[in-house]
Structures are given as structure tokens and as C-alpha cells.
Image: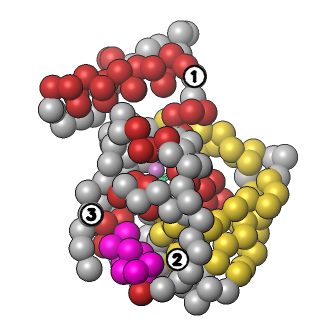
Amino acid sequence: MALREIIVLPDPRLRLKSEPVKAVDAELRALVDDMFETMYAAPGIGLAAIQIGVPRRIVTMDLAREGEPKEPRVFINPEVLSSSDETSTYEEGCLSIPEYYEEVERPKAVKVRYMDLDGKTHEIESDGLLATCLQHEIDHTNGVLFIDYISKLKRDMVVKRFKKAAKRGEPIKPLAEDDKPSHHIG
Ligand code: GNR
Ligand code: NI
């Protein structure tokens, strides 16, 4: 097991479309182990392989609350089969866009097909946090980030902050309330 580095904005690899997994083998299991170690250490509730720089369609997730038994889940080659017309809004964050949180509206429920670590195919109906997280992670496998769903003004501001921090070799600082654009212009 190894802790991997999580890549952050503006790393261009976050925009890659990841490749499907062809076979469940020892190398894939080792990669999934590393993803869980990295996700739990972050800590995060989900992780896509591209976030550790590996452009393959693999997602790890654990939605168990703090203090509850772990519920590790793996989704290989996940795809959305159908989405509800009804939407819900959730304040999202991303380990690749640290310290930034914003409300995102998505379909409330999604049907997802994926493969498990035994190579068996499953279809699940999800809603709530599972549906939100699955959509966020499947987006990562397609090079899509949650900031793509917010206003251009907010997105440009976030990208600018991360580019500036990267140029200076500085860690990103939490966004102060005062620096946020007011709702009038946001
Ligand atoms: O840890 C995470 N929390 C989270 C909260 C709301 C919506 C999505 C997420 S996923 C995120 C971890 C991450 O960046 N996964 O790609
Ligand atoms: Ni993310």
C-alpha cells in the first residue's frame, strides 16, 4: 500500500478522459488499495484514479459517517444509464480543488452500471449523497470538474487563485468571505 499525491487545479491531467479498465488483475487491486489509502488519509468520501494521476476509469468511495464502520466501495468503468428529471442541490468540494466549496445542482437520482473487483457487472439506482458523489466521480473520469457547473465568474476566480498559487509555489489558502463576489454579481 502506498499513499499517492493528489493532483490539484490547474493540473491539465484533471481534464483527461480516462481509459476503461480491461481486466481485474493484481495490478488493478494494488492501485485500488492505494486509492483507498489516499482517499481515507485526505480525508475524502470519494476518489477517481485520475486524481492520483492515473487516467483509468476507477472510483473508490466510502460514505460512512465518522465513527461508523468503514463501507469501502469500488466502481470500475462506471457509467450513468439514466438520470432523474428532478434535481437536488448539494454543497460540493473536491480534493483536487482544496478549500473551495460551492452549491451544485444535479439530477437527484441516477442509475449507474459498473464492474466490481471480481469482474462482475452491477446496476444500481442511487439517490441522495450516493447519487451526487457518483456523478462527481464519473465526471472526473470524463475530465469534468464540479466548477464546470457554477457561474463563469466564480469558476474564473477559482482557477485564477490556483494558477497564482501554483506559480508562486504556495499552498492554496481558504477563500475569505470578503473575497467572494456578492450574490449580485455572482
Ligand atoms: O470528499 C469529497 N466530498 C464531496 C462532497 C460533496 C460532493 C462530492 C464530494 S467528492 C469529494 C472527494 C473528491 O474530490 N472526489 O473526487
Ligand atoms: Ni473530486
Mark 2 nearby-residue class (10 Å; few <14, some 14–19, many ≥20): some
On residue 73, the disc is: 2
Q: Residue furthest bottom?
A: 118
Q: Earlier in the sequence, mark 3 or mark 2?
A: 3
Residue sitting at x 55%, y 19%: 152
Task: Determine if the magenta segment contains residue 31.
Answer: yes
- Vertical side of 7 occupied by 102: above or below: above
Q: Is residue 74 visible?
A: yes
Disc 1 residue type (three-letter) = Ser
* Image location (x, y in percent) of residue 76: 58, 72
Number of callouts in the render?
3
- Vertical side of 95 occupied by 125: above or below: below
Secondary structure state at the residue bearing disc 3: loop
Of residues 153 and 169, the one nearer the viewer is 169
Q: CA distance from mark 3 to mark 2?
A: 19 Å
Q: Are marks 3 and 2 in contact (CB under 8 Å)?
A: no
Label 1 sits on residue:
151
Secondary structure state at the residue bearing disc 1: loop
Q: Is mark 1 within 8 Å of ligand 1?
A: no
Which colour style is shown? secondary structure
Q: Which residues are magenta?
A: 27-36
Disc 2 residue type (three-letter) = Arg
Residue sitting at x 39%, y 26%: 159
Q: Is residue 132 visible?
A: no
Label 3 sits on residue:
4
- Between disc 3 and disc 1, the foreground one is 3
Of residues 169 and 41, the one nearer the viewer is 169
Split into 4 quadrants, where in the image is the N terminus?
bottom left
Of residues 59 and 68, the one nearer the viewer is 59
Secondary structure state at the residue bearing disc 2: strand
Mark 1 nearby-residue class (10 Å; few <14, some 14–19, many ≥20): few
* Image location (x, y in percent) of residue 97: 38, 41
